[in-house]
Image (cartoon, rainbow, N blue to C red):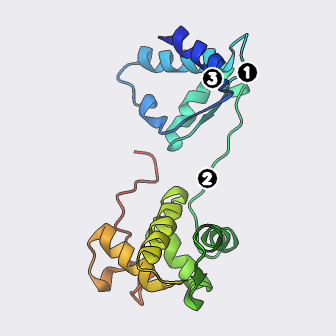
Amino acid sequence: LTELMFSLFRERGTVCLHIDELQHAVRANSRSAFEAVQDLLKTMADMDDWPLHLILSGMPKIERMREDEQIHRRSILVPFHRLEGQEDAEWVHSCLKAVAVEGCGLALGDELEGDEFLGRLCHSVNGAWGTMIEMIQATSFRCLERQRATLTNSYFAREYERDTGCQPTENVFLSPVWKELKPKYALKMDEE
């Protein structure tokens, strides 16, 4: 099937392939299975007749792929750190505006403009970039479904409650001691 896959890349003009959740390949049951994945990636990145570029993403374990010298010298590592409210406030706010304001045409409630809300948002998703974007999208869509023009903290509180089943006292968006709460998301950000 490898040759068929390569011919389909050429036929369809695919020049970039994103493989997400690559950490699952790192958990291969045997060294030979892991090396087979490494060999396939090297072959894909080194096709003589087609310029295929790979984006490999996943949890920190994927760094093991770079133990192979050929993969190491052909790759650029772009680490993503956990989002922190204050340190990443500008980026988080720009993401909030891009999704809710530019993408959905919503206005932002005043309480969403402050550093405290941005901190709550980052904390609610355990600092995970993709999950934060999904949270903003889901909350914006819920606001649109209710035919409202302004996105407020209450929408985030409801979305968090819906996703986690938490009590109001455990809701990161409502609790005065939100920094002490453990996010209810089933995310494990560090290596297993």
Label 1 secondary element: loop
Q: Residue at x 54, y 31 (%)?
A: 64
Q: Amino acid at mark 2?
A: Phe
The residue to which callout 1 is attached is 51
Give the mark, 3 or 2, whose residue is nearer the N terminus: 3
Alpha carbon distance from label 1 to label 2: 26 Å
Alpha carbon distance from label 3 to label 2: 31 Å
Q: Residues within 10 Å of mark 1 (few under 14, many from 20)?
A: some
* Mark 1 vs mark 2: in front: 1
Q: Residues within 10 Å of mark 2 (few under 14, many from 20)?
A: few
Is any part of residue 21 visible from this angle?
yes
Label 3 secondary element: helix
Is any part of residue 172 visible from this angle?
no
Apparent side of residue 78 relative to residue 120 in the rendered image (left or right): right
In front here: 50 or 178? 50
Image x and y of residue 24, in percent: 42, 34
Q: Amino acid at mark 3?
A: Arg
Image x and y of residue 106, in percent: 58, 78
Alpha carbon distance from label 3 to label 1: 13 Å
* Mark 3 vs mark 2: in front: 3
Give the mark, 3 or 1, whose residue is nearer the N terminus: 3
Q: Is residue 117 above or below residue 26?
A: below
Image x and y of residue 18, in percent: 58, 35
Label 2 secondary element: loop
The residue to which callout 3 is attached is 12
Image x and y of residue 57, in percent: 56, 40
The residue to which callout 2 is attached is 80
* Mark 3 vs mark 1: in front: 3
Q: Amino acid at mark 1?
A: Pro
